[in-house]
Amino acid sequence: MHAKAKNTKVEDILTDEQLLAEARTRRAGGNEEIILAAKILSVFRDCRKHLGIECRKALGIRITQSINTYKRRIFFIRISVAAGLLLLIGLPALINLYRPSELLAFAENNPAVSGEADTRLVISGDEVKIDSEESKIDYSVDGNAIKIDTSEQVTQRVDDRKPVINAVIVPYGKRTRVTLSDQSVVWLNSGSRLVFPAKFGKQKREVYLEGEAIFEVAHDSAHPFHVLTESLKVKVLGTVFNISAYRDDSLTSTVLVMGSVELSYPGKGLFRNSGCRMAPGMLVSYEPGTGNIQSSEVDTRLYTSWRDGYLIFHKQPLINILKKISRYYNVEIRLEDPLLGNETFSGSLDLKTSAPDLLQVVTEIIHARVEDVDNQIIIKRI
């Protein structure tokens, strides 16, 4: 036994590579601290056999981060509690903990936003294509009947014993309003996907979002409403809010118009989440790559006006404005001089006009011009 281990506490053993090696091989002699460390390691080693490869990788990364980030004693307390829980609840419960919900499994395994021209409604394994630019999809309370715009209706069989997961996929250049079975309303912006149960269960209401949407949630304190994204979870307490969670954006942002929401996002330690409660008029931005989160008070109209057919900007860089316009109209826009992207614009833009006409308003302010060449809009300096 290594001399260093004689008077070393178990929390120090779990954060020392050399002593960990002794614990793993049980070269402990009569040292109770190393024996205890070996038992803790054994619990986690046995659990690994029952987890999938991706879960094991994720768990390993989070354990490593915790060892490097937090004080040894705090880490030991958490690891001991986790080990105790594993012994108490058993492996079946652990497997259930890591098994994704049916909603998330559907979101991971079914079509994402693509280059298709039509909006798609996915129900019971079938796809219904909707060619209108501004479509409406309304669910009945039981989830069996679905009305599309004003003329089409489709049906599906919903069984209360097993959730029936549906999805709406909105391509770039189109928008859709969805009324869910609980009568909550979701406005989906261009390039967005919403995954949801045709009829919500008895415990909670939960949907998955990729892209951007405005939610107007029907109040029901007995059944919380949760919006899941790739990096954030939003618990809704009867409210109106906007979420932007595009995969090609570095930030996921939430703007609260009225009511109350609680955000939760991955923390930097083992089994730890962080979170905050938002107040009306508040913007919270989360950067998944770094874990950084920022909040500020904003004019909510800047983030929700697209629902009403116009965009409002206040000293926004041109590069950000062009990204929104490109998504909304599904057009390619290029800056001849990249430095033009730093020019700022303030004002309101009517989305009922064409993309070139709308961009003409912006470029006049920043002393540039618009050219339409081979189905590509080019912005040049004057």
Image (spheres, rainbow, N blue to C red):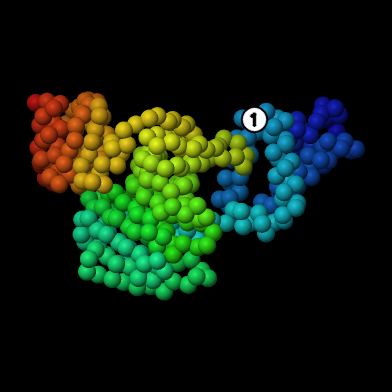
Residue 371 visible in image: yes
Residue 338 visible in image: no
Q: Residue at x 11, y 29 (%)?
A: 364
Question: Along the horizontal axis of the image, is 133 left or right of 262?
Answer: left
Q: Quadrant of residue 244?
A: top left
Q: Residue at x 90, y 38 (%)?
A: 30
Disc 1 target residue: 70
- Residue 196: give x, y in percent of width and height: 42, 59
The outermost residue toward the right is: 30
- Residue 299: give x, y in percent of width and height: 31, 33
In the image, residue 349 sits, relative to residue 3, either above or below, namely below
Which is more toward the observer, 21 or 142?
142
Q: Residue at x 36, y 50 (%)?
A: 216
Mark 1 Cα within 10 Å, few/some/many (few <14, many 20+)? Answer: some
- Tag 1 secondary structure: loop
Q: Quadrant of residue 77?
A: top right
What type is the residue that disc 1 sits on? Tyr
Q: Quadrant of residue 306?
A: top left
In the image, residue 168 sits, relative to residue 294, either above or below, namely below
Question: In the picture, which quadrant includes the N terminus?
Answer: top right
Q: Residue at x 66, y 54 (%)?
A: 94
Which is more toward the observer, 151 or 287?
151
Which is more toward the observer, 312 or 217?
217
- Residue 117: give x, y in percent of width and height: 23, 57
Which is more toward the observer, 75 or 6?
75
- Residue 159: give x, y in percent of width and height: 47, 72
Question: In the picture, which quadrant includes the C terminus?
Answer: top left
Report the number of discs: 1
